Image: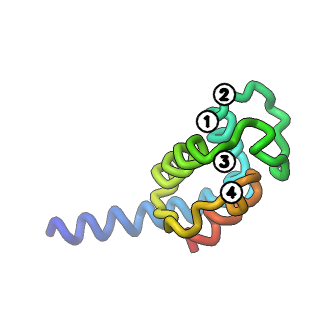
Amino acid sequence: MKDKKIEFATRTFDYMRSMIMNREELYRLIRDEVRKSFEIENDNIDINDNLMEFGLDSINMVMMILEIESIFNIEIPDEDLVFENFDTIKKISDYVLRIMD
């Protein structure tokens, strides 16, 4: 019985996640997380802005990635943890969408 409840909860979570996760919503969620991670007051962060200009370095990139993994219930492989995958909001969002599919 417990396994069936877990299976149902997992299916429900996956369904709900797929329903709310369009690209624009994901951009907004990632933008909010970036603003929080880097303590940025500016609402006008473009999805293509290079996050290194806002202070992205290896330490806070890993911290931000851990938070994103937690929010979206995903696991990003260590070999993908490179600046080129996560230096803009668009790249982060595209990566999350790809890994969620």
What residue did someone put label 1 on?
37
What residue did someone put label 2 on?
39
Say left or right for 88 vs 16: right
Say left or right for 91 vs 71: right
Q: Nearer the viewer, mark 2 or mark 4?
A: 4
Q: CA distance from mark 2 to mark 1?
A: 6 Å
Indicate the secondary structure of the residue bearing disc 3: helix
What residue did someone put label 3 on?
30
**Amino acid at circle 2:** Glu
The image quarter in which residue 85 lies: bottom right
Q: Residue 86 appears at what percent x and percent y?
A: 68, 56
User: In the image, what residue occupies the spot 66% across and 33% down?
Assistant: 38
Q: Residue 55 appears at what percent x and percent y?
A: 72, 36
Indicate the secondary structure of the residue bearing disc 4: helix
Q: Residue 27 appears at what percent x and percent y?
A: 72, 51
What residue did someone put label 4 on?
83
**Amino acid at circle 4:** Phe
Q: Residue 83 appears at what percent x and percent y?
A: 68, 57
